[in-house]
Image: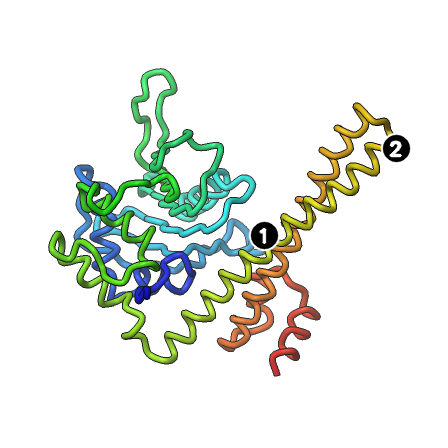
Amino acid sequence: MAQFINPFSDWGFKHIFGREISKDLLICFLNDLFAGEFVIKSLAFGNKEQIGLSKDSREVIFDIYCTTDEGKEIIVEMQNRGQEHFIDRALYYTSRVIVNQGIKGEWDYDIRPVYTICFMNFVDPLLPLGKFRTDMVLADRDTGKTVSDKIRMIYLMLPLFEKTEAECETDFERWIFVLKNMNTFERMPFLAKNAVFKKLAEISDLRTLSKKDMDKYEDSIRIMRDAYATYKYAIKTGLEDGRKQGLEEGMAQGMAQGMAQGIEKGMAQGIEKGKAEAEHQKNIEFAKLMLSDGDSTEKIQKYTGLTIEEIDAIAQSLH
């Protein structure tokens, strides 16, 4: 029976990497990720709510945001499901952190490097086919020479990492193997290879969690599973609605060309509708969790996009 935290849950990921007590785990992982490039001796967690460009801008929220002893700013994010424009989304978030470095008055545009690291529990078709790790930098297209080291995005598509425990040769590979499979382990591997995995085992052992932390973890798992189930159901019903609508339109336009075009249009509309319903349900579940933590209606509205009426109705349903 598995006895370790699922790192794909929001609470689990932050419990492992996003706390002062476990900060050395994040330092070790980052040093293994950037092996041979630089060494991080210490880091400080930053305010994850980066103020927008104007007073009316929405805040940008990251899973983990930290600054190294050398001043490099690092965003670490775990993403469970694919979404449209995911690559652009990461670029947008990274750019916002760079823009926030701006200084009023005289300034020479000396900016600090900003790195975004995306754990992806899915395969994005826009990234190189079959490649587990993709590093994106500003470089000359023809020579490949890096032009600036101030922005970098690293995408780790976990489904494409297929090495077994015995095949992992570096600590970075061991990290990825553990994070990808940790929620299935009865024992933590690599304990003899590196002491960091012993601490990881201690921090992520479900048996050591307090009742309060276990409740938060189980809520996080429930939200993750509900969101996934809702997403799958929405896709299924969306496809069914799309097929039905497409067939009806196709039959009306003709048995040949009309049917093909109608099915394609109907499926697209059904999928979009299903995704919207899944996203709305996920926001409802997130609102429930925030309400249980005592967050204000204004804050919940900001982070979920739900109306005040919807939030009030959810609050009433919890009593």
**72 displayed left or right of 238:** left
Q: Quadrant of residue 221?
A: bottom left
Distance CA(mark 1)–CA(mark 2): 30 Å
Which quarter of the figure is the C terminus placed in?
A: bottom right
Residue type at numbered disc 1: Lys
**48 displayed left or right of 309:** left
Residue extending farthest left: 192
Please tell me the numbered disc located at residue 252.
Answer: 2
Residue depicted at x 32% and y 48%: 73
Residue type at numbered disc 2: Ala
Please tell me the numbered disc located at residue 232.
Answer: 1
Residue depicted at x 39% and y 31%: 130
Q: Is residue 169 visible?
A: yes
Q: Quadrant of residue 22?
A: bottom left
Label 1 or label 2, whichever comes before in sequence order: 1
Which quarter of the figure is the N terminus placed in?
A: bottom left
